[in-house]
Image (cartoon, rainbow, N blue to C red):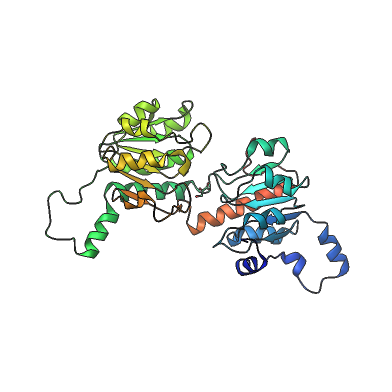
Amino acid sequence: MWCSRVALRRLQRIAVTPLTTAGGLTGAVQKQMSTLPRVYITRQIPPEGLKILRESGQVQFELWDSDDVPVPRCELLQKVRGMDALLCVLTEKIDTELLDSAGPNLKVISTMSVGFDHLNLEELKKRGIRVGYTPDVLTDSVAELTVALLLTTSRRLIEATHEAKTGGWGTWRTLWLCGYELANSTVGILGLGRIGVAIAERLKPFKVKKFIYTDVVPRPELASMINAEYVSLDELAKQSDFLTICCALTPETKEICNKNLFSKMKNTSIFINTSRGGVVNQQDLYEALSMGQIAGAGLDVTVPEPLPTSHPLFTLKNCVILPHIASASYSTRNAMSALAANNLLLGLTGQPMIKELKI
Ligand SMILES: O=C(O)C(=O)CO
């Protein structure tokens, strides 16, 4: 029903390949184009990436020309048939069913994301499909948003603007809307990579006393950049005044932030997650926040996305929820789009990609 023709027509304004739809082409040019590798793009990506693909002259592409609605699964399964490459975003599950549907021509998956939990890497490896992704170009944007979310949560900015707008602002009061400050605090980072370092670099000028982190193994090179100490997960929970989650979602990190972790945290601590919703057990988080086991949480990512407006977490004043916007700046999203396009072209021509996942 979701994939009925009428629904699709309403959703999909056009599916184009500028190469194959251009009018007035000679038969020879048309023939030449029809031999170009075929690419399906699962979203209307920012213009820089499309321009690179269009101007390369190396591929013919078709895209789901909407950014408002993801391509319906059954449409995607049909469209990938016989494709040589796929440029996708994080909402598309690239699993066995999809790869079977694509068939043996598929050589490259290029995802416009740093996260790759939507990709079945084992299956991709088995089939010899190369994978491009977009780390680094979004580090600044994600770190900046993480700091904004941390301050919004710890200094209760959403509550404060609501009070100001709705008549709750009476006289100046000594403890009204008090929060927690970064000065003299301990900031914990779960999963120290480029983004964790970039967050710490931005937080340092706020006079943070100490940075601590945990990861599967110590990361001395990265840690030395921010003078961070390696601790166990338990110690991270116990010592952190602010705990920021920066790890990838893997089977090992799934719901790693659970009752056990929250029970060890201080009741004055602030929990921030800009990685993936799946690293958190949301029921446990709800209980920790509503029972005052921790002071507040700022989430840019949830399960599912979008989080239904009826979700209990939305009822809590001490929980700030953003709609997965950490990398949402114009420059970053264009850079991600361009990198995804370049990875795809390099992968298709058998060259090393700029950013390729080693699988
Ligand atoms: O690139 C990603 O993985 C994102 O989550 C986008 O912000």
Question: Looking at the image, which residue is at 26% across and 55% down?
Answer: 159
The N terminus - image quarter: bottom right
Question: Picture coordinates of residue 225 (x, y %)?
Answer: 42, 34
Q: What residue appears at the point 68 percent right and 51 percent down from the top-left corner?
A: 86
Residue toward you, 78 or 185: 78
In the rendered image, the vertical position of residue 331 relative to residue 105, given as above or below: below
Can you give x and y, in whole percent of width and height, for residue 22 in the image? 76, 70
Whether residue 135 is visible:
yes
Residue at the image point whose x is 64% and y is 41% from the top: 356
Q: Please tell me in which quadrant of the rendered image residue 14 appears.
A: bottom right
- Horizontal relation, residue 273 to residue 20: left or right: left
Choose top left, top right, bottom left or bottom right for residue 270: top left
Residue 33 placed where, x, y %? 81, 61
Outermost residue toward the right? Answer: 28
Farthest residue to the bottom: give it: 24
Q: Is residue 201 visible?
A: no
Of 146 and 162, which appears nearest the observer?
Answer: 162
Q: Is residue 103 left or right of residue 300?
A: right
Please state the horizontal and vertical placement of residue 35, each as a whole percent of the image.
83, 57
Of residues 18 and 259, the one nearer the viewer is 259
Residue lying at 25% horizontally and 43% vertically, measured from the top left: 181
Q: Does 196 sit above or below residue 72?
A: above
